[in-house]
Amino acid sequence: MADDGGRTAAHDMFDADVASKGLGIELVEAGDGAAVARMRVTPSMLNGHAIGHGGFVFLLADTAFALACNSHGPATVAAGGEISFLRPVREGDVLEAYATERVRQGRSGIYDVTVRRGDEVVAEFRGRSRTIARD
């Protein structure tokens, strides 16, 4: 649930996300089961073929997924995820990951994430979430 300033629990989670921030991932927006995250492909993200390593594309999609499923408030983690790489990404590309909630029932949820370079879809991700209890 967003507060009056548009902040959600996802914003609080992202504030503490050292891994995503260390890769230059930005939270563009998050709320009501949806989120957008952005990342520029840097030289250190390239593989031996001089294209973006799929692990970094997965990480961007996973971050958007985490933001979307945590936008409701209870702490939520990934129960699983899979990705299809559709096009290679290159150094300097700015990628945006658009996450949307497909279903949330009880403690479980399913979210789809489309990763784009401009208007071009470069990957599709599906994540399964699980709400956890905080100790």
Image: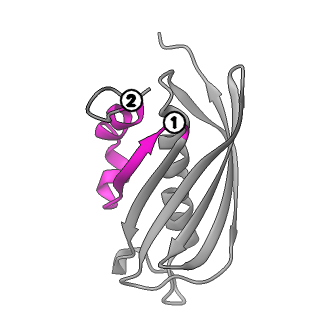
Q: For residue 98: magenta?
A: no
Labels 2 & 1 near each other (Cβ < 8 A): yes
Q: Residues within 10 Å of mark 2 (few under 14, many from 20)?
A: some
What residue appears at the point 45 percent right and 80 percent down from the top-left corner? Answer: 46
Q: Which residues are magenta?
A: 8-33
Q: Is residue 43 left or right of residue 34?
A: left
Residue found at x 48% / y 48%? 35
| Distance (Cα) linking label 2 and label 1 | 8 Å
Q: Extreme bottom residue here?
A: 49
Name the residue tied to disc 2.
Answer: 2
Residue 104 badge: none
Which picture quadrant has residue 114? Answer: bottom right
Snapshot colouring:
one colour
> Identity of the amino acid at label 2?
Ala
User: Which picture quadrant has residue 103?
Assistant: top right
Q: Is 19 displayed left or right of 107 in the figure? A: left
- Please tell me whether mark 2 sits on a helix, a strand or a loop: loop
Foreground pick, 83 / 119: 119
Circle 1 residue: 32
- Which residue is drawn at the image coordinates 34% and 77% (left, top)? 42
* Coordinates of residue 106 in the picture (x, y in percent): 72, 19
Left of 124 or right of it: where is 56? left
Residue shown at 50%/79% (left/top)? 52
